[in-house]
Image: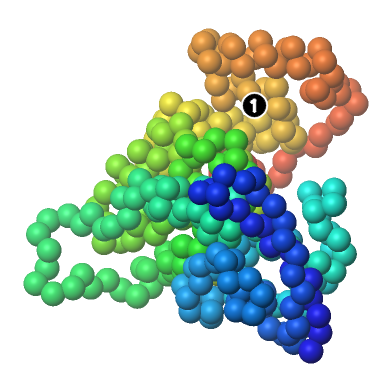
Amino acid sequence: MAEYQLKIRRYNPEGGEPPYWAEYTVDLDGHRSVLDGILKTRDEVDGSIGIRCSCQAAICGSCGVRINGQAKLACNTKLEDAASEPVRISQRSGIREEGEITVEPMGNMPVLKDLIVNMDEVHWKKVQRVVPWLLPEGDPPEREYVVPAETMIDVTQAMACIHCGACVSDCLSMEVDPLFIGPAALAKAYRFVGDPRDAATEDRLRDLAEDPHGIYDCTHCFSCVQVCPKGVAPMDQIMRLRRRATRDFEINDQNNGHRHEKAFTKIIAKKGILDERKLLQDSLGPLRPQGGIALLRSFNSARSGLLSTTSQADVQPSPCSGTGSIGSFGATG
């Protein structure tokens, strides 16, 4: 067996004390999980450590925490792998030393105690927001709804979600906008949008497209894709929702998502490169108040040197060939 250094973030809101790091040494084989290390420490050293867990098989999703600064399932992360991870930039200021394993509660959710967060307050509330049940048309059948198996293939990825909250924890959009519906809930939304038994597809899409904190609030940071332990790739599901909204139903939303996609593909097809200044103008529209305000702000940024001032003479883009595929690229941009 080897010794591993666990550095656990402790916090009890009822005690009135600020959060602090507690360090423990645990003797376990390297192939054992971080959860095993935490439970051994709780059993033998400090029984007050709070952590939520159940199946210990990466199925229930209960033991979601941040290990070395990234959301993971504690039961699905080996001690030897966690100890050998390089120190992240965000943890260099004395938070973690080489070889240590830091464990802290997931982000974007209130902490109840130590490593336990309030999933009801954020995660489950947002899942309820997207109406996570089928809305079929007409009277229910005498038995079950029968559909061809191949028609369900499109939603199998979204159905793999175990609601561990890892994507919610590391979502940068939610850090900036806590009202953002979030990656887990929107992945769940696609599970029903893509279900052939559901009869409210357009209503669901219109609702999520018109919401300022809906499908167009995602900034494509890929964090949710990186941390998902089940390969759900929530950002991909969000992009699918956007494609269905813009292409299948031509939903011209108040958030300019539809116009943004059209402008994006049009500029690429015409110039061969993306002109950010033109994209802003065409997405919002110079005659719309919102677009005019955004353009004025962009002028101030340009004067400060924050925007590229490269002239067209410096860049000689060649016309795009095969522009028929640009729509697919623009839908994810």
**Is the residue 106 above or below the residue 79 in the image?**
above
- Left or right placement of residue 199 versus residue 256 in this view: left
Q: Quadrant of residue 82?
A: bottom right
The quadrant the C terminus occupies is: top right
**Is the residue 38 above or below the residue 291 in the image?**
below
- Left or right placement of residue 201 versus residue 227 in this view: left
Looking at the picture, how far across and down is residue 90, in whole percent?
A: 78, 49
Residue drawn at x 56%, y 31% is 260
Q: Quadrant of residue 101?
A: bottom right
Outermost residue toward the right in this view: 314
Residue 180 can be seen in this image: yes
**Is the residue 190 above or below the residue 172 in the image?**
below
Q: Residues within 10 Å of mark 1 (few under 14, many from 20)?
A: many
Looking at the picture, how far across and down is residue 84, in whole percent?
A: 83, 71
**Which of the two residues, 227 or 261, is positioned nearer the viewer here?**
227
Q: Which residue is mark 1?
A: 279
**Which of the two residues, 12 or 245, is positioned nearer the viewer here?**
12
Residue 233 can be seen in this image: no
Q: Secondary structure at mark 1?
A: helix
Residue drawn at x 42%, y 37% is 209
* Colour basis: rainbow
**Which of the two residues, 308 or 29, is positioned nearer the viewer here?**
29
Looking at the picture, how far across and down is residue 42, in whole percent?
A: 61, 74
Looking at the picture, how far across and down is residue 165, in whole percent?
A: 52, 58
Q: How many marks?
A: 1
Residue drawn at x 55%, y 21% is 284
- Left or right placement of residue 139 versus residue 328 in this view: left
The kind of residue tagged 1 is Leu
Residue drawn at x 39%, y 59% is 191
The quadrant the N terminus occupies is: bottom right
Outermost residue toward the bottom in this view: 1
